[in-house]
Amino acid sequence: MKQAKGVPIRQKLLIPMILLVIIENILLISVIFGSSLLSYVENKEKAIFYEKVSNRKNYLENEMLTRWANVNNTVQEVNNTMQKLIDTKKISLDTLDDGSEYCTPLLKKVSSKLIQLMRANQVTGAFIVLNTDNLEKKKEQGIFENKPGIYLRDFDPTSTPSKKNQDLLFKYAPKALTQSMNISHGKTWRPLFEFEKEREYGSYLYEPYQAALKEEDPTEIELKDFGYWSSPYTLYDDDTKVISYSVPLILNDGTIYGVLGIDISLDYLLQQLPNGELIENEQGSYLIGIESEKPGTFRNVLINGMIYSQAAGNRQITEITENKDDYIVKNQNKVMYADAEYLDLYGENTEFSSQKWALIGIVPKNKLLVFSDRIIRTLIGAVLVTMLIGIIGVIIVSLTISKPVSKLIQSVKSTKPSGDIRFIRTGIQEVDLLSQSIENMNEEIVDTAKRFSRIINMASIDLAGFEINRKENTVYFTSKFAELFGLEKESFFEVTSIDMFEELMKQLKGHELDRDKQKDNEIIYLIPGEKTRYVRLTLNDTGDYCSGLVENITDMMMEKEQIEYERDHDQLTGLLNRRAFYRIMKGLFCQGKSTLKITALVMIDLDGLKHINDTYGHEFGDKYIQIAADVFMDSVPDGTVVSRPGGDEFYILFYGYESKVEIEEKLYQLQNDIKHQQIILPGGEPFPLHLSAGVAWYPQDTTDSKIFMQYADFAMYQIKHTVKNQFGYFDMEAYRTSQEQYNEEKG
């Protein structure tokens, strides 16, 4: 046989084999970086960050609306006091804002109410500004007049209040008032609000006052619709920056005579925004911004809590711009991520609904995506090591190949890639070295894969995954898969087919949470055990292949549940707050009579709470409220909606009953239980629980939810101002008589 001419086999195989190794690694890189796993992990890191910002937004919004802006009762008390002084001719509206001497009787009487408001709402300031002028016309004429009023400050509202109010400070108040009260005032104290020197009426006065002045009958508008949250400002000759919430003071005849409000210092507001919760070592920050005319860009930053990289100078946020689904922040050429969540501070179509506030969370990109970056670096390193080992092996193989190549090929053909690669030994040194080199290369690749798996298992985030190949009827899953679902590892690793895997997953069906509240490709499980665990399974099914990512989201779910609980419940009693009650009631009325059936709304007002607070202090007043809350919860059936909207008010909603008699039995039992409740006052003196309650019926009295509440409130009002300490049902005849009397007096 004629010997073939050509180059030696070692040289012939060297270049093709090296190219083969390179192509294999290119395919490996394509598989790794072409899949959605890395982008999915990165998106999940962002999602956790967005969830934290959203939860903090909900908390801050709840504080601003239900605690700090809870001024309605104080406004009503001030209006009542003002009306009495007008009726007794101790004050005249014609001279009210002409100077301190004309309004001092009013300010003396309401100063204690402002202090109570500050204590109850835990705010840094409270104020009343008196005015009867059209400020817009004054402003157009260039006239800025000083106005009388009170402005009190408390720089640490969370500390225990001083019984003698020594922790408070007067900023504005008449001299006669400061001399009669045991409250100090600093060098910046002024008897009047200094608008003349500032050449501007403060927005906290101008905006809500003028908004009410525009209305033909402001008494027909809810007070909260005139409420105004201001941008940061400082008082005259004062460095403390604050934001404020203020509402107009309106008498029953529609006369507007000033504003009442609270303020929150920026330092105190910053305490409500813990930067450390966004990312470790407080390298993130929160900002509060007011949306400008340009979408996606924020200016007028209220708080700059940036703590990122203190290594050099003052680093200020220079730009926040929207990029697809993210907000990108540029801070001295360092790219950061931001999430903007809008605060729902105003009702729709109200005077200030166009003023949108947002809470912005900001974190450095390299700190937010640290886990995905670590995965990318590890994968790149693994690919480079694999490529290097492969090329070295190819060179060795090509240099040692000799005659028994055909025998080696037969051995390679008979080797199964799914098991360990072991070639036969020919006894020829070159061939055996080639076989050994290929075996070593395989071991290195397997070891690299194992190292990567160990790195994944050592990560701080519990992750697991699986892939189903329907073409080959095979299943692959990572080692943590059984651990996350609380399954026995021994039985789990016996799974070798798709049917076995699906049968095993059916066992977890009972642990699934409500699918209606989840995304289409997600399933959330509640895994029981010594420590309850939330596990999220995300699926990607393309037909022939189905892959899934499993992650432990227990911390995120627990934090979400805690924040939702704090948002919807009263801190003192644990009952539903006003906002949660209205939401539940609105949902029930939307479902209609099929759900409500026979329903009763009980509005309750505690008798004697003011006496206990004034005589024995708020500590016993709080105990009195808690005793009432406990008896309400213990005496009503499960499913009854019990709420404390604020102060000494309580709502109880009985719904879904077949007859009125059933509810009356529950009310009778509730009244009996109330009779046996009491609080032990100092000295051992018992004080029974006294309350006045009004009851309205659905659908007997009305089917409109708003009118339903008005009727219950009217029934309670009738009891409160007549016999007291009783339950009374709504009387339509009495209600109509009251309305006719009111219209006659108004006319």
Image (cartoon, rainbow, N blue to C red):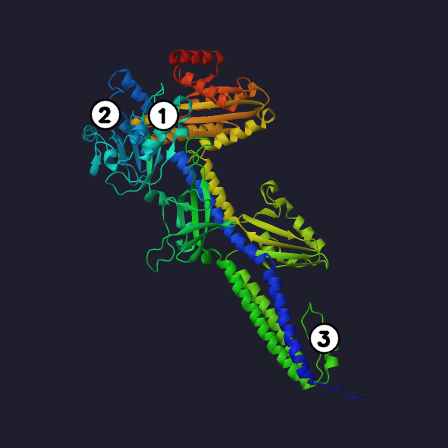
Instruction: Name the residue at the front extreme.
Output: 141
Task: Left or right? Give the position of 651 relative to 163.
Answer: right
Tell me the crowding category of disc 3: few under 14, some 14 to 19, or many 20 or more residues within 10 angstroms, Cα based.
some
Q: Quadrant of the C terminus?
A: top left
730 w.r.t. 428: above or below: above
499 w.r.t. 664: above or below: below
Residue bearing the label numbered 2 = 98
Q: Earlier in the sequence, mark 1 or mark 2?
A: 2
Q: Nearer the viewer, mark 3 or mark 2?
A: 2
Measure the alpha-carbon separation of dots 1 and 3: 93 Å
**Residue 488 position in % (x across, y down):** 62, 55
**Residue 101 position in % (x across, y down):** 20, 24
Residue bearing the label numbered 3 = 412
Residue bearing the label numbered 1 = 213
Instruction: Name the residue at the right extreme.
Output: 1
Q: Nearer the viewer, residue 64 or 693?
A: 64
Q: Can I make out residue 616 in this image?
A: no
Amino acid of disc 3: Val
When asked about the image quadrant of residue 213, the answer is: top left
Amino acid of disc 2: Asp
User: What residue appears at the point 56 percent right and 68 percent down from the top-left corner?
Assistant: 382
When asked about the image quadrant of residue 115, the answer is: top left
Q: Earlier in the sequence, mark 1 or mark 3?
A: 1
Q: Quadrant of the N terminus?
A: bottom right
